[in-house]
Amino acid sequence: MKALITGGNGQLGHALRGCVPGGVTVIDRDVEHLDITDRAAVRVALEEVRPDVLFNCAAYTAVDRAESEEEAAHRVNATAVGILAEEARAVGARLVHVSTDFVFDGTASRPYAPDAQPNPLSVYGRTKLEGERLAGEGALIVRTAWVYGPVGHNFVRTMLRLMGTLPEVRVVADQIGTPTYAPGLAAALWTLAGQGACGIHHYTDAGVASWYDFAVAIQEEALALGLLPTAVPIVPIATADFPTPATRPAYSVLDKRDTYAALGGPAPHWRVQLRTMLKEIQAHG
């Protein structure tokens, strides 16, 4: 099997390259080498590579900036997905597209099933939902949440930096979801793609947390591994105390039961995966 990865230098693209199954050849293209909004460039890349599977890991992920750059967000998160889907079909490739918990409004009191009614609250969420539609029925669409990994910009790396430099950190405690370790997500994507799965699937690590819970765990685990010199106070705050341009869902836990069944069992708990990532940083910096 041959796979092409867009957004190859991002944290998920990096993770996909780190767990390639045997017998698979991978070619990755980052934004410097492939503008997914350029149909002609996408066509040339796909005709050159002729992949069996196209993993789209490229996205406009600046959630707050998207509120003032809606056209740019729509171009990458929606229009480009339609281009990738159409050009992939033209060469016989299957599209694997990664989406988000932000397609939901967060008003539920139980985990969102894949067929739950979306109602995005932000430009980012709306453009990602439109991208799902444009991916088409034959695509594999995997919604995930709170992704982090050893490389790239993410909440864990930001917390480690702030906890190492500030006298205290303030973290929102009334937004509930589930962290997702990028290498775990990547392994799930490879498995689902290998099974020929299509349609909408949900995947995160197991468990539930607030951003505050996540921050507390980051500090505790980092201290145990010697990645932080000392503990600092972590102050729980309300969303209203930290206003942002984009509205975020207050509750975005995803129902992963069907995906876990397809994968042969549940993902590890998010705290186990957090420890794995911090050990990676400890070992390799």
Image (cartoon, helix red, strand yellow):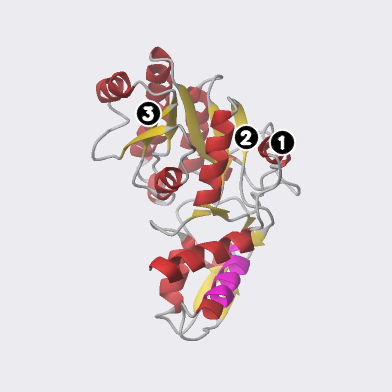
Q: Is residue 66 magenta?
A: no
**x and y percent of residue 212 in the render?**
60, 68
* Contact, mark 3 vs mark 1 (Cβ under 8 Å): no
Q: Secondary structure at mark 3?
A: helix
Quadrant where the image shows the C terminus:
bottom left
**Disc on the earlier residue, 3 or 2:** 3
The amino acid type of the residue labelled 1 equals: Asp
Q: Which residue is under mark 3?
A: 80
The amino acid type of the residue labelled 2 equals: His
**x and y percent of residue 200 in the render?**
61, 30
Q: Is residue 5 above or below residue 223?
A: above
**x and y percent of residue 108 in the render?**
72, 46
Q: Which residues are magenta?
A: 210-222
How packed mark 3 is, by other alpha carbons closer than 10 Å (few <14, some 14-19, many 20 or more), is: many
**Disc on the earlier residue, 3 or 1:** 3
How packed mark 1 is, by other alpha carbons closer than 10 Å (few <14, some 14-19, many 20 or more), is: some
Q: Is residue 113 at least partly visible in the picture?
A: yes
Towards the viewer: 12 or 282: 282
Q: Residue at x 75, y 49 (%)?
A: 109
Q: Is residue 80 above or below residue 65?
A: above
Q: Which residue is under mark 1?
A: 258
Q: Secondary structure at mark 1?
A: helix
Q: Separation of disc 3 and disc 2 at Cα? A: 21 Å
Of all residues, the one furthest to the front in this rendering is 23
Q: Residue at x 47, y 70 (%)?
A: 159
Q: Separation of disc 1 and disc 2 at Cα? A: 8 Å
Q: Is residue 219 magenta?
A: yes
Of tags 3 and 2, the one toward the viewer is 2
The amino acid type of the residue labelled 3 equals: Ala
